[in-house]
């Protein structure tokens, strides 16, 4: 990150000051982007770009700092962060196209408005305040002045006119016309004399009453039908008109001065903080909590995303970033009084039912009766403060503020432009500009039909359905034949495979059908299986052998819990070509699997391999087991295999989702190029598994998130990488508990054997973290500290608190399966 003359980091769109070429005055502009040679590109008020050495500019304001933004002190970007609870900005204005003559100073943003009236993303009301929406497309009408003083109106000018003198600003917005701009048509140059909003495409998000859901795609609204939220109060609108009448021409912003109120994570508040002394935090982690937020005690709920259970909801009072601990308040149901408790940050999750935050747009619930006022906007507002455990402070659209109970409001879903456009689908342009009844929101139409639509089914559709069913039946017959051939070939190939292996598995590690069935029911591990695995573990321990005797590759019967078992498609190339490729894959796996990867293929479902990866030392995945179910599609190897992860509802890595989705370029589930992508000729199942181990289960998984590699060495990266590692190790331990209780079929003995052999090392690692404070990802294979353990800051107190809660459960589970040397550290 580049720094200015005072050592202050320079952020995009900071207002910076620099010395002009004459050396006698100072210019100002927005820092747009960084350039080679430690220079920055500065956008001046007249729209020109100048390149300046970063060390020759000074940050003077960050006017983009607004309500609800997370910020950090510029002098300590790696410490605690805060949230902006209020902002005040003063503007200095110059005449547009002049850029030098200051005509007004200390102007409030409420006294000005965009020349067009609206900008993309504005929240707007439909006339009368009956609907709330967001602008996602705009068009403007421009009056152009000819040399003979005649005037012609150009509608949708952004598609028909262009700027004669292009600059950075005109390149950003094709509709950014202002009176006085010189514009050109196909063959002539004009001067714009008046600019008005022509039409606006609005995505409607809420209404004061429960309305029937819209099914038609809406045409763009005329701008006179919508009112911008925040510009609907009479004093603001008249103030803007008076200012424009006094100055007589459009203006540009030449200077800004912004101060903000900040609520810090430790619960303290600061008012009137200069925005230039703060840095905006763009990316917040799951552990970035703020006072007033409602959270869930995850130790009392099995899945964070589940509905808030009674007694699990807490309210954040303060947070210690250094210790990763949170002081929370909750009501003791037994004593009916409020209790404050210090908890680990890793044991808390955001409440799904009360996830309000500063700046959120909210609506009243339940809906009130429609007001007789023509502009009633008191049903929508934004959060200005999280008061306490029961109330939230809201400023409503009519300018009034009040405290409301949590169940009286609902927060609007945050959506990007792309998401809104995708949901709207195709829409029809209003060619004649007339609004018909069906153009209006449903609340404004006289349609009293209660049906969702007419049923237009006829005999033709029945005939069509018959064709579809016939084709489906033929597909089933074809699939049955292919399945029979492949099953027969699978048996032959499985027998041959046993000869290829040329080694036997110890009888103690064979999975008997009765034992498998018992474990599948979800109960405790079967006694015979525990005794067999424990006996083998003791023998290995006595001989100093810490290596699993479980075969790295084998062919067995397909498990009933395989993720893709219900999918019957396979072998669309016919048995010969498809089976030939599968046979090649099996040989590759047999000869090249690393010591930390195990794979099972299945006789009756050759298209459904299952693999397990053992987490390596020096990572937060150390000694963990990570299972993946794979499916070779009918088009394999032209298309890559499908892979799902056994997540147990836990997010152990940015590339391994709660749902089991595996995000990897090789699988086509993530962007990539060249050798990162699947190649039918050179890629293989082995490459997929090894890529997951080497590229996903890494020492610093935080940077696996898309685009996060750019944060290496930045304040955001340094703030988040260590907490993410600590949380990942805790998730790893919880995954171990799930695997011991619910082992995937076919790997029951392997799981018991693994944890019997490695259990004492896992607990030793927990002891190194709890008692010695070693940082995560710095231990050796025995769970002991290394030289790297002393080169990094110690692990947090919150991490140790969370370990203190999970280790007793881990000891109990390991003891149940007969692991030796397992005791509470």
Image (spheres, rainbow, N blue to C red):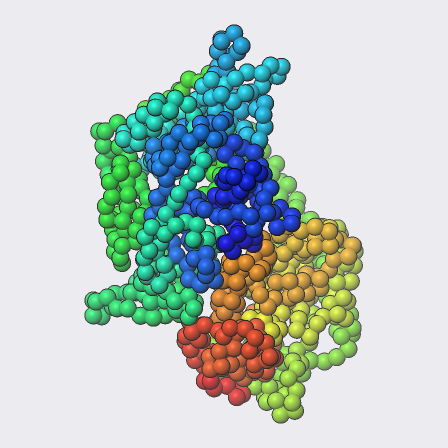
* x and y percentages locating residue 471 in the rendered image: 64, 41
Res. 29 visible in picture: no
Q: Residue at x 65, y 91 (%)?
A: 543
Query: Does the rendering let one see residue 371?
Result: yes
* Direction from residue 589 to residue 728 in the image, left or right: left
Viewer-nearest residue: 14 or 213: 14
Say which residue appears at 42% left-offset and 70% top-offset.
323
Q: Residue furthest bottom?
A: 542
Give the camera-side residue of 453 and 378. Answer: 378
Side of 638 where 268 appears, left or right = left
Residue 696 on image: x %, y %: 61, 63
Q: How many marks?
A: 0
Query: Residue 333 location in percent, x, y?
Result: 24, 67
Q: Please provide percent x and percent y for residue 294.
A: 34, 58
Q: In this rendering, is residue 543 above or below 681? A: below
Residue shown at 52% from the left, 83% from the top: 764
Q: Is residue 623 left or right of residue 522?
A: right
């Amino acid at each position: 990150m580049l720094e200015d003359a005072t050592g202050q980091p320079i952020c995009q769109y900071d207002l910076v000051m620099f010395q002009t070429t004459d050396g006698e005055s100072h210019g100002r502009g927005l820092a747009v982007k960084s350039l080679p040679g430690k220079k920055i590109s500065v956008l001046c008020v007249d729209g020109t770009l100048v390149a300046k050495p970063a060390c020759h500019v000074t940050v003077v304001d960050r006017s983009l700092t607004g309500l609800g933004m997370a910020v950090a002190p510029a002098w300590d970007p790696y410490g605690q962060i805060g949230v902006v609870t209020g902002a005040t900005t003063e503007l200095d204005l110059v005449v547009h196209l002049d850029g030098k003559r200051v005509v007004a100073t200390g102007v409030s943003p409420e006294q000005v408005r965009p020349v067009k009236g609206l900008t993309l993303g504005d929240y707007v009301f439909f006339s009368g305040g009956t609907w709330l929406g967001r602008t996602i497309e705009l068009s403007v009408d421009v009056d152009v002045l000819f040399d003979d003083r005649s005037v012609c109106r150009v509608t949708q000018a952004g598609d028909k006119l262009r700027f004669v003198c292009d600059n950075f600003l005109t390149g950003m917005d094709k509709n950014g016309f202002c009176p006085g701009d010189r514009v050109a048509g196909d063959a002539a140059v004009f001067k714009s004399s008046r600019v008005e909003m022509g039409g606006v495409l609005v995505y409607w998000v809420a209404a004061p009453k429960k309305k029937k859901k819209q099914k038609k795609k809406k045409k763009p609204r005329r701008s006179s039908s919508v009112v911008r939220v925040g510009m609907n109060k009479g004093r603001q609108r008249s103030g803007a008109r008076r200012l424009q009448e006094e100055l007589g021409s459009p203006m540009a912003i030449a200077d800004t001065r912004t101060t903000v109120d900040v609520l810090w994570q430790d619960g303290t508040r600061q008012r009137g903080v200069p925005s230039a002394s703060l840095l905006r935090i763009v990316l917040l982690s799951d552990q970035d909590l703020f006072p007033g937020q409602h959270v869930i005690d995850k130790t009392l709920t099995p899945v964070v995303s589940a509905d808030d259970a009674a007694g699990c909801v807490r309210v954040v009072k303060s947070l210690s970033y250094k210790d990763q601990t949170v002081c929370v308040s909750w009501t003791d149901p037994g004593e009916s009084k409020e209790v404050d408790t210090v908890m680990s940050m890793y044991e808390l999750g955001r409440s799904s039912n009360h996830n309000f935050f500063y700046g959120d747009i909210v609506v009243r619930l339940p809906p009130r009766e429609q007001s007789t006022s023509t502009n009633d906007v008191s049903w929508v507002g934004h959060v200005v403060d999280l008061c306490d455990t029961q109330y939230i402070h809201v400023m409503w659209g009519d300018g009034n503020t009040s405290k409301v109970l949590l169940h009286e409001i609902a927060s609007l879903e945050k959506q990007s432009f792309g998401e809104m456009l995708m949901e709207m689908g195709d829409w029809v342009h209003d060619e004649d500009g007339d609004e018909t009844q069906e153009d209006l929101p449903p609340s404004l139409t006289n349609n009293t039909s209660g049906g969702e639509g007419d049923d237009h089914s006829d005999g033709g559709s029945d005939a069509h359905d018959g064709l579809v069913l016939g084709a489906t039946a033929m597909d089933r017959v074809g699939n049955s034949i292919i399945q029979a051939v492949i099953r027969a070939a699978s048996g032959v190939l499985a027998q041959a495979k046993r000869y290829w292996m040329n080694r036997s598995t110890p009888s103690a590690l064979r999975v008997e059908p009765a034992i498998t069935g018992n474990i599948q029911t979800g109960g405790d591990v079967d006694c015979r299986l525990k005794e067999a695995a424990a006996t083998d573990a003791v023998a290995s321990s006595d001989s100093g052998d810490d290596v699993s005797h479980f075969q790295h590759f084998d062919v067995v019967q397909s498990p009933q819990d395989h993720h893709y078992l219900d999918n019957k498609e396979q072998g669309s190339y016919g048995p010969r070509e498809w089976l030939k490729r599968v046979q090649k894959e099996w040989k590759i796996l047999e000869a090249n699997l690393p010591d930390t990867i195990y794979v099972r293929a299945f006789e009756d479902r050759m298209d459904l391999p299952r693999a397990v990866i053992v987490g390596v030392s020096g990572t937060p995945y150390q000694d963990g087991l990570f299972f993946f179910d794979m499916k070779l599609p009918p088009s394999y190897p032209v298309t890559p295999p499908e892979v799902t992860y056994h997540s147990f509802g836990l997010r152990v890595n940015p590339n391994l989702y709660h749902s089991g989705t595996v995000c990897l370029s090789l699988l086509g589930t993530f962007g990539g190029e060249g050798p990162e992508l699947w190649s039918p000729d050179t890629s293989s199942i082995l490459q997929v598994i090894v890529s997951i181990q080497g590229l996903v289960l890494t020492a610093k998984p935080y940077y696996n998130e898309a685009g996060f590699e750019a944060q290496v060495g930045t304040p955001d990266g340094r703030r988040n990488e260590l907490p993410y590692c600590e949380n990942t190790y805790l998730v790893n331990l919880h995954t171990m508990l799930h695997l011991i209780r619910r082992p995937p079929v076919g790997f029951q003995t392997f799981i018991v054997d693994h944890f019997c052999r490695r259990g004492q090392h896992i607990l030793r690692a927990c002891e190194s973290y709890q008692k010695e404070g070693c940082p995560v990802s710095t231990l050796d294979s025995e769970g002991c500290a290394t030289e790297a353990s002393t080169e990094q800051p110690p692990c947090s107190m919150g991490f140790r608190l969370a370990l203190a809660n999970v280790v007793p459960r881990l000891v109990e589970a390991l003891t149940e399966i007969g692991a030796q040397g397992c005791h509470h550290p």
